[in-house]
Structures are given as structure tokens and as C-alpha cells.
Image: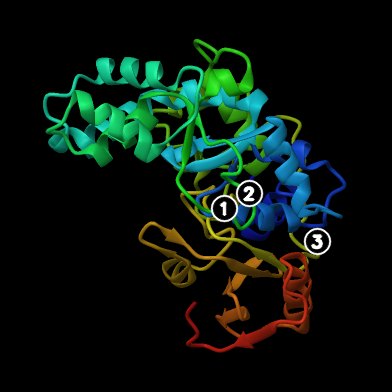
Amino acid sequence: MQLTRRTLNRTALHRQLLLRRSDLSPLEAISRLVAVQGQEVNAPYLGLWSRLSGFALDDLSDLLYGGQVVRGSLLRATQHLTTAEDYVWVRPLLQARFSRSSQSAFAAVTKGVDRDELATLARQHLTGCTLTRPQLRGLLAERWPTADSMALGWLAQALLPVVHIPPNGIWGRGGATPFTLAEEWIGRPLEAEPAPERLVERYLAGFGPAGVKDVQMWSGLTRLREVVERMPLRRYTDEDGRVLYDLPDAELVDGDTPAPVRLLPSFDNLVLAYDDRTRLMADEHRRQVCVGSVTNPVILVDGFVAGMWWLTKAGLRIQPFGPLPDEVMAEAERLLEFAGQKGAAIEIGSQIRP
């Protein structure tokens, strides 16, 4: 069965809670999304606001302080928020990726550093306490004074499952990143050998139907084709003939289903979930949205990317890719009110930059 681009678009929006704001709790929504991108501190709050009815800033802050949601490096070795229940199996599943990427990134500036010894020493320093990255790298530099101290701190983060506890991750808060051993903060050990099928299933539930390259792009894992093909999944094709996989009983949404205007934050899950992003945006727009390591905030109109936006101290700036409906302004006003900037200016222009 061939699926049209609009069917894939509407199905993705439905599974991402973007066809209508959901009554799910924030904890339930984060679990459904598997992990919420969190490179920018405020982005997860904006992403959940776009998806949930009645969402307030304290709803997520309380989960972080309570330990039900944790912040740390996960998918693609980037910062995410995930439930504590999911962290304990997702992080060990990704550990091989962390080890490989850290080796390629820091080998030249950490010559003579035994990685196993570094992990053991970092764990000793962190046991029973929280240290900021600068504090931890300072302690590690005492053992390896000729190595790049910045790299030592990043290596520790890659080799050890650590989480960044509040006030890190709280709306509007900055400062040095704190390191806490994940097992101590969560209060349980991480799973020893989680199955990759589990992650594929959760991905498809939140983002499918999708191809193998899509799953790999989203997760950062490789060599998943054999994993996917041995699973009891339903197969489709898209308009370009790519094979897509989905859960056997997962719902598809008609391509003519109305889609509301949504303003998605930087690095939003939906934008980064696919290798082929044509179900969301034209290729020429992708080149403007995804620039190097940056993924700009986007405006969805009729389900597709129609522009970019930035929240500033002065208000909200919009860079459209074409004419925008009035509902964009209305949604922008609602976003400003949520962000505590009710009544601030909204500026629209084809050449605006943040």
C-alpha cells in the first residue's frame, strides 16, 4: 500500500499530539514522545505547550524536581528530557554510540588517557554528590594534567550515565551544567541489555510510519535494518517508493484532515525525527531550517513548515516562507502569553534574523 505525503504528514502530526492539543499529562506526553529534545533550556516547555491543553511552566519544572523526568545526553548524543522509567533502558542502549563518538572527537587531545580509568575515577568523584562540569574536569585534570581538561569533562559525560539535575533545565535558568550519577538520582540501576526492538517500537508509535534510515537518524543508532526487518511490522511505500514500517495496529490519518497552525521550538522532535523530511517541509525550506548543528524554530501551516520564528526579549520575530494566515498571529500571541510576554510586539519580515 502506498501512502501519500499528506497521509504521512497528518499521521505524524496525530502521533505527535499536534492535530489538537491533548489532555494527556506532561509525563504521559513525554513518554509518548520517548524523549523531548532539550539543547535549549526553554524548548521542551514550548514543545509541550504546543501539544498539551492547559500546560503550565510548573508542570514540567515539578517533574524535573521530583525526578520523574530527567535531563541528559540521549538520542544522537544530544540533550533530551525523558521519563526516569525510560532513561534506565534508553541510555544503555545508546552507550556504544556515545563511546564511538567520544573516541573520534577527543582521541587527539586525550592521548595517554585510559578511558576505563577515567570512567572509574569520574564515578568515584560523583558518588554521593553533584559536581558541575568545570568541577569534575578540574578533578580529572589532576590525574591527567597534560590532557585537554575540557575534553576530560566531555569524555566523562559520554562514558558515564549522568543526568543534569534542577535547577538545570528549568525555564529561564542558566549556569554551569551539574553532573549526577543517573542511578543515584533515579534510585535504580540501569538495564544491562535492553533490546533495540523496544526503541524501534516506541519510535514508530510516536513517529511512524517510517523507514530504517528515519529510525537511525532519530536515534543515532546504526545497523538497524536487520532489527527492523525481523520485527512483525506492517509495510508500506511512500510516493518515492521507499519502504516504510509501522506497528501492525497503528492508526493512519486521512491526508485531508485539517491541521491547525503550530509554532514548534528549536530542535523539535518532529523536525529531527526523519532522514526524509519531505513529509514536513520542502527541501529548500529544510536548508534554511536546519543549518549546520542548529535547527531553527518553525511555523506549521496546514501541517507543513511555512516559516521560522524566534522569541526575543522584545517579543516574537517571524520569517515567513510565503503568505501566512491570520491564525499564525493568533497563535503567536498565545505563545507570548505562555512565555510571560503578553502584549509584546510581533514582527514579520522576509529578512528578519534573531
Query: As displayed, is residue 99 above or below residue 177?
Result: above
**Image x and y of residue 216, in percent:** 45, 37
Disc 3 + disc 1, Cβ < 8 Å: no
**Image x and y of residue 319, in percent:** 55, 81
Q: Residues within 10 Å of mark 1 (few under 14, many from 20)?
A: some
Q: Considering only order in the chain, which callout, 3 or 2, is on the residue closer to the N terminus?
A: 2
Query: As displayed, is residue 61 above or below residue 172?
Result: above
Q: Is residue 54 left or right of residue 237?
A: right
Mark identifier at residue 137: none
- Distance, label 2 to label 3, CA atoms, is 36 Å
Q: Nearer the viewer, residue 126 or 262?
A: 126
Q: Nearer the viewer, residue 308 or 132?
A: 132
- Distance, label 3 to label 1, CA atoms, is 33 Å
Query: As displayed, is residue 196 above or below residue 220?
Result: above
- Secondary structure at numbered mark 2: loop
The reply to whether residue 197 is in sight is no
